Amino acid sequence: MSTAQQLNTRFGIDGHLSFAEDAGGLVVAKISNAQATASLCMQGAHLMTWQPRSQPLPVVWLSRDAKLAAGKSIRGGAPVCWPWFGAHPSEPGFPGHGYARTVQWRMVESGKEPDGATRLLLRLQQSEKTRVQWPHDCTLELTVIVGETLRMELSTENTGAGDFTIGEALHTYFRIGDIGAVRVTGLENCDYWDKVGGSVLKRQSGQITFSGETDRVYVNTAAECVIEDDQLGRRIHVAKSGSLSTVVWTPWTEKAAKMGDMGQPDGWREMVCIESVNAMENVVKVAAGTRHTMIVEYRAEPV
Ligand code: TA6
C-alpha cells in the first residue's frame, strides 16, 4: 500500500488533489476544484463524499458513524460491490457484496479535465488473497471524474482464458431531506424483486415513495432515475449505462438501529440508496479477453 506521501508525490495536483492518512490508518484522497469537493478512500476505491459547489449540502451521503478501518466497509458514499452483489451464491462465508470494497486499490493516473474537473483512475489487482474467492485472471478499474457532475466508470477486464460472470454495483447513498418526503421516478412499470421478507417478483406502479423498509432489485432497466426532494429543493439525476438493474433501498427504523452505523438515532432518514447494478437475471458474462464497463453519472439541480 502506498503511503500518502508517495501518492502526493506521484499523483497529487496542487490545490486539486491531495492524499492524507486517516485516523483509522487508511489513506484518503481529497479532491477540491472550482466545481466540487469530494473524498475517496484508497481502500475499496470508495468515494465517500461529493458536494458540487452549487449545492449547500453534500449530494453523496456519508454516515456520521462511518468508521474507516482496514478490511471493513464504510457506511455511505459509493461502495464498489464486485464481483458479486448481495450474498455469494454458494459460499455463505464470503463477504456480502464481494471483496472489492474492503481491499486496497492502487492509483494509476490522476489529471485535470479540460472543463476543470478532477479525474482519478484506480485499479484493483488480483492477489493470492482475492484468488481464494475469485480464481480468475482479471483487473478491475474505477475512473472517477469529480465536477459539477460526478461520473464513475467501473471496468472489468477478463485477462484470462476462460469466461466468467460477475454481479456488481455502485451502491451509492444519496443525501436527502427526509425519506418520508422524497419520490423516486424512472422505474415506473419495471419488474423488481422485493427483498423485504423474502424475494418476490412484483411490478412497479407509479413513482416510488417510502413508508417502511424498502429493498428492491429492479431488473431489465437501463432507465435514469430521479430523486425528487422538495424539502431540500433539488432533484438528483442518477443516469447509467452498462447496468440493467437498479436497487432502491432504505433500512427504515428497525434495521437501521441493528446496523448501528447509520448515524443514530435517525441518520437513516437523510439518505436513500439508488444503486446502479448488475444482479439477479442481469449478471454479466465477461468473455475471455473482453472488457465490461458500467458507468454512472450523477447531477443535482434546483427544483
Ligand atoms: O443494496 C441493498 C442491500 O443489499 C441491503 O439488503 C442491505 O444489506 C444493504 O445492501 C447494505 O449492505 P451492507 O453490506 O453494506 O451493510
Image (cartoon, grey):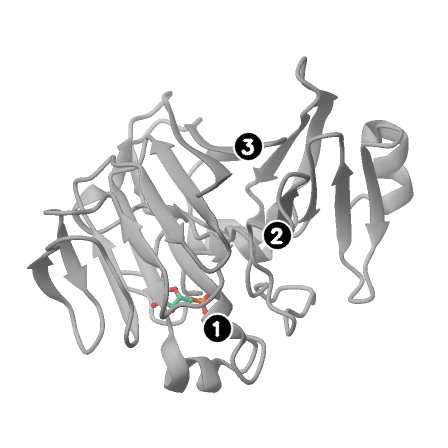
Density class for disc 1 (Cα within 10 Å; few <14, some 14-19, many ≥20) is: many
Quadrant hosting residue 133:
bottom left
Whichever of labels 2 and 3 marks the residue nearer the N terminus, that label is 2
Q: Quadrant of residue 211?
A: bottom left
- Which amino acid lies under the numbered mark 1 shown in the image of this protein? Trp
Position in image of residue 148 (x %, y %): 60, 32
Q: Would residue 115 be found to the left or right of residue 212 on screen?
A: right
Q: Is residue 3 visible?
A: no
Residue displayed at 55% across by 52% down: 60
Q: Is residue 222 left or right of residue 111?
A: left
- Answer above or below: position of 254 versus 126: below
Q: Which secondary structure, mark 3?
A: loop
Which residue lies at the image location 75% right of the left edge and 39% below the top edge?
31
Instruction: Give the residue type that dot 2 points to.
Output: Pro
Where residue 8 sits, quadrant-wise, is top right
Amino acid at pointer 3: Thr
Q: Quadrant of ligand 1?
A: bottom left
Q: Nearer the viewer, residue 277 or 150?
A: 150
- Residue located beneath label 3 in the image: 149
Q: Can you see residue 270?
A: yes
Q: Which residue is mark 1?
A: 268
Q: Is mark 3 within 8 Å of ligand 1?
A: no
Along the line of sight, the residue nearer the viewer: 185 or 196: 185
Q: Position of residue 241 (x, y in %)?
A: 34, 29
Q: Earlier in the sequence, mark 3 or mark 1?
A: 3
Q: Position of residue 53 (x, y in %)?
A: 68, 39
Instruction: For mark 1, give the secondary structure.
Output: helix
Q: Residues within 10 Å of mark 3 (few under 14, many from 20)?
A: some
Secondary structure at badge 2 equals loop
Query: Which residue carries the number 2 mark?
Result: 58
